Amino acid sequence: MINRIQLVLKPEIPDVVGEKIRRDAGNYLQIETGRVKTGKIYNITYDLTPEQIATFARQGLADGILHDVYTNSMFNDPLYQTFVLVARLPGVTDDEGMSAQRTLSDILDLGLDTATQHIFSQDIYLFESNLPDNILQQLAHDLLGNPLVNHFEYGSAGKRIDYMPYVEISTSGQYETVDILVEDEQLLALSRERLLSLNLEEMQAIRDYFRNPERQSERKLRGLPSLPTDCELEVLAQTWSEHCKHKEFSAVIEFTDLNSGETLQIDSLFQTYIKQSTEIIRQRLSEQGNNWLLKVFSDNAGVVKIDDDHVFVWKVETHNSPSAIDPYGGAITGILGNNRDPLGTGVGGGRLLFNTNVLCFGPPDYSQPLLPGQLHPRRVLAGVRHGIEDGGNKSGIPTVNGAIVFDDRYSGKPLVYCGTGGVMPMSYQGRSSWEKRIDPGDLIFMAGGRVGKDGIHGATFSSAEINEHSPQSAVQIGSPITQKLLSDFLEEACRLGLVKCSTDNGAGGLSSSVGELAQISGGARVDLENVPLKYANLAPWEIFISESQERMTLVIEPSERAALLELAARREVEMTEVGIFTDSGLLEVYYGKVPVCQLDLAFLHHGVPRKYLQAEWSNPSLPETVLPEISDFSRVVLQLMGSYNICSREAVIRQYDHEVKGKTIIKPLMGPAGKTPQDAAVLRLFHDSWAGIAVSNGILPRYGDLDPYQMSAGAFDEAVRQIIAVGGLLPFPANHEENLFWSVNDNFCVPDSAYDPVHNPDGKQKLGKLVRMNQALFDMSTFFNIPLTSGKDSMKNDFKSAGRKISVPPTILYSMVAKIPDVRKTVTSDLKAAGDLIYQLGETYNELGGSEFFRLFGATGTQVPQVRKGTALDLYLKVMQANRSGLIQSCHDISDGGLAVALAETLFGTGLGADISLLDNELSPVVQLFSESHSRFIASVRREDQTEFEKLMAGRVRLLGEVTESGCLQVRIGENLLFDLTVSALQEAWDSPLSSVLI
Amino acid sequence: MVKALVITGYGINCEEEMAAAYRLASAQAEIVHLNDIFQERISIHDYDILNFPGGFSFGDDLGSGKVLANKMLYRNKLSGKTFLRDIREFLAAGKFLMGVCNGFQFLVKMGLLPDVNGSQQQEVTLTRNNSGRFEDRWCHLQVNSESNTPFLKGIKQLYLPVRHGEGKLIIPGKIQQRVVENRLNCLSYCTAGGEPTSRYPENPNGSHLNCAALCNDSGQILGLMPHPEAFLSLYNHPNWCRLRREDSAISEAGEGLQIFRNIVEHVAGNRV
């Protein structure tokens, strides 16, 4: 029988979750719920006696001070008239249920099976109001859960609830063959019906492979059918997916510049711009005998040298599509998945140092009608934020830096960029940590979570194919505790020298991880019968390509097997031998004795036909914006402070642990009141040295409408100047001092850019923008000698529903890390003392195009900020020199909103004021205050250092005014006071927009 | 040399900085996985101070610290002894125990704090903040001047970060009286001026008695929500740049370090 234990808070304990639900229901759904009571239900399918259940309920689950306990009966109080029960759909991660199983096993010591789900947890919400079913359903779907992962019951209180999320699958554990020896039209139908996402050329290549008579006889010899098995087709589709093979970044592109009429043939964007720029920098470095760039683009994350004993590993990924349909699950699996990249680089087992996240959403007050399947941007924001909180906080990794960008065009698909950096020892037991070595005969182990249908074919499964007991597969919820146990174990095992190398099981699962590693030894053989499952009856191909989370593939020498299994048992990490590496040139997969897949590795990895794409570019013809004269500057500045792209992120930041591990030196908010926003984050690397790193992000999608080249170059500059602002040092090939590494991840997120006359008529222009973004990347990185070490591209960021399409603007994020020799010498943005002089560093131009100021008026303009590399470099070198002399007391980069916003930000929480005089020159006050020209800073300097500072900066600075005790920001031009605002008024305008959304 | 044992595993995640704190306080610190104690590969009795750092043991499922407390209360070690019995013996030997954040939640749920009845039954609890949110923010803390715990000796006020979603201490009425009488409420959330306060955000969670930490009667056990191991150097302070500008001779040591120095010195002093 199923036993049910319900816990509800005692009447005297405030129900803070219930209160929040009541508030949110009123604010966002206009539903008056009355009082809300929350409760937890545990459904237990183990065979236990009533006494055992009572013991478990009282001692194992309940907190005697908080809870009333109901065993096989339900809380009932006439005060509450209606309810919603939120259960999980079959197969959805239920950590609470699993933890309850562990505690049950500890208490009763019965040797229970705790690896598969036997306790199912549910949440129940009781409402004072007598709400009709349609309103309860709305509360369930729009506030309390998500129909993609949850099952709901609702109605009048006291209604009987029997739902249990059992998984029942009727399919057999064998393969099917697929007839691929068919005509082109049927090939395409096959790709479509089996959700392979392969085009005709790719399907033809597969047909040719299987039609080869030699191959057919060889397959026969090995006991395989001549036609491909479902497993083989799935492995090919997964390996050849855009996600894994980056087909568009590898394509041959014919690029026509319509301005000049010139045509350029680009043989792979990746090779031509990204890899080539890093190669050039690597050569310059090594010519000077400077060798900190250890590994680029060839593993899960790039590797650079910190010192003779340590390396730094760092990767930024995206998780956009999953976050669009289940924001919490998408974000948490995004961050946990990205954690496994540095964790599985080289040998693996790095210690994770920090997370970053950069998010692009539709505005929280989005008011257009939602399309079917589209979630409101406010909900996406809240869910993603929560996922990042749990993903980072529960893993003990500080979230130190990020950005949030709002634009209507992200309201279909949000962008969720997750970054993670970590540190590995240079070697483990004498073997290099960052290289992957595999020899034939090495064993394949899978460690961590179990395998279910999770993630198979992603979100493309249509709802028609799902019944109430099909395991939910489209959306996954991460399990931070499973991953924490796995990552602690991996670190320990690697340090003991037990692991030869490791890799992540992410997209593509075992198929991808083993398929890729097999290239190193020259082959692999896997037996899927050994793979531990969450529930029975998965088909072999499903086991092989499942994307179930929190798993890694480990490569082990046979001599270490016993020691490793013993350690895994002690750390309660499930670890299973699933195969062996060979040099057969084949990827061979068995289910027991039955061969289910045998593919030639060369074909698998190099057989995909290249794409040929067309791109074109012409300057957009946009009308120049003519604005009315600004008479009330105070109003404009306050409006700007409160705009979504500028306002305070504190409501988000405070919910992330940004200082666990005790190494965060410049946190997102600093100063006397913890209110001043900072530029780059700074962390120390170890507790026994002052060496550290600075971490920054540059992203400027709004400039892309005007000029994607300048958008990309500007984002690169933004990330660089944030690091310069905190006291970072640029790399010079000839500088051997302290191994001053820089490591950059590029992350492209663009709408579908493959031209199609019907479905994507402006595809060539979109691809042209991507080419321009890449050209800027090449120019900037080679100019500053700042290398890309890893990256990612996400090519199909379009939300399609009801015949409409919402496409993201082409977006590039540059995430940078630079070594800081001594974190104690870094500089924060907050003004420090009255009497200090305030300077603008760098020059302002009439560049209001794409500015936040223009956006206030619904305008775009034409004059996009230009990156002037040479003058930028000159300024950064001077700032570095001034910092070496300790002259700069505070420094803040000028970006979104321009000078006015940057000035206000340096004052928040300081108790100080500033008296500023603009130049009475040809630039209008509007331009001086709101233009977003690049490569500029606001810095403050002690009065006694004025002469030395100005001399050193040699004309590149302008004295703006001084720090006062007034608590006001006063800005004048000549005799004319433009505005005089109290810092508290500025702060209020800046604080309120997001805190009111996220309370 | 004074020996500190720092427990890790199962989602604990502040072990590294906790060990660093003891090393900075001139003690020897060892990080050990909890299961190695259950397997009796390590004995807590070889150490002077036992530490349960912060983190999210078992993801805070079933309530923070709950699953870990159950493990300690009910699961037998290899030889059949429970961990709780081991801790009783450890305390009887005059040794010290500290729990921070998740470690504090776990000590409370195990019944080791405040333990006014001496029966090691759960008397108080830590639950969701009034705000309903996890928050990372720095708080001013006032030390109870009558507290006897050596951990806080000589300290009047502290400024430390809290980083929790379940830090609201609920102390039922009768227990509350005993806690106050016995001066077990050793740290209070307070204003910058040192006045204990129930006002958010100075008091980040709405704890009864504005209480941020508890010790037991003997002062051997300290549990606290704020993180002393997160303020080991000046450069952890959110306003370190300005503090250094205002006082160029300011100490590079963080305020949190003093708690570790205190207990290490106390143990070392008792030995002489």
Image: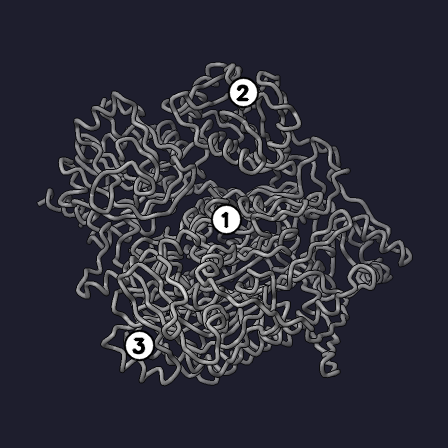
Q: Tell me which amino acid carries mark 3.
A: Arg
Query: Residue A884's mark?
Result: 3
Instruction: Report the residue at 83% width, 60% height from top.
Output: A758
Quarter location, residue A680: bottom left
Q: Nearer the viewer, mark 1 or mark 2?
A: 1
Question: Residue tagged by mark 2?
Answer: A4
Looking at the picture, how far across and down is residue A99, in whole percent? 48, 33
Chain that bears disc 3: A
Q: Are marks 1 and 2 in contact (CB under 8 Å)?
A: no
Q: Secondary structure at mark 1?
A: helix
Callouts 2 and 3 on one subunit:
yes
Q: Tell me which amino acid carries mark 2.
A: Arg
For marks 2 and 3 on the same chain, the one whose residue lies earlier in the sequence: 2
* For residue A513, side relative to residue A98 (left or right): right
Looking at the picture, how far across and down is residue A800, in whole percent? 73, 51
Question: Residue tagged by mark 1?
Answer: A388
Local packing at callout 3 (Cα closer than 10 Å; few below 14, some 14-19, many 20+) is few
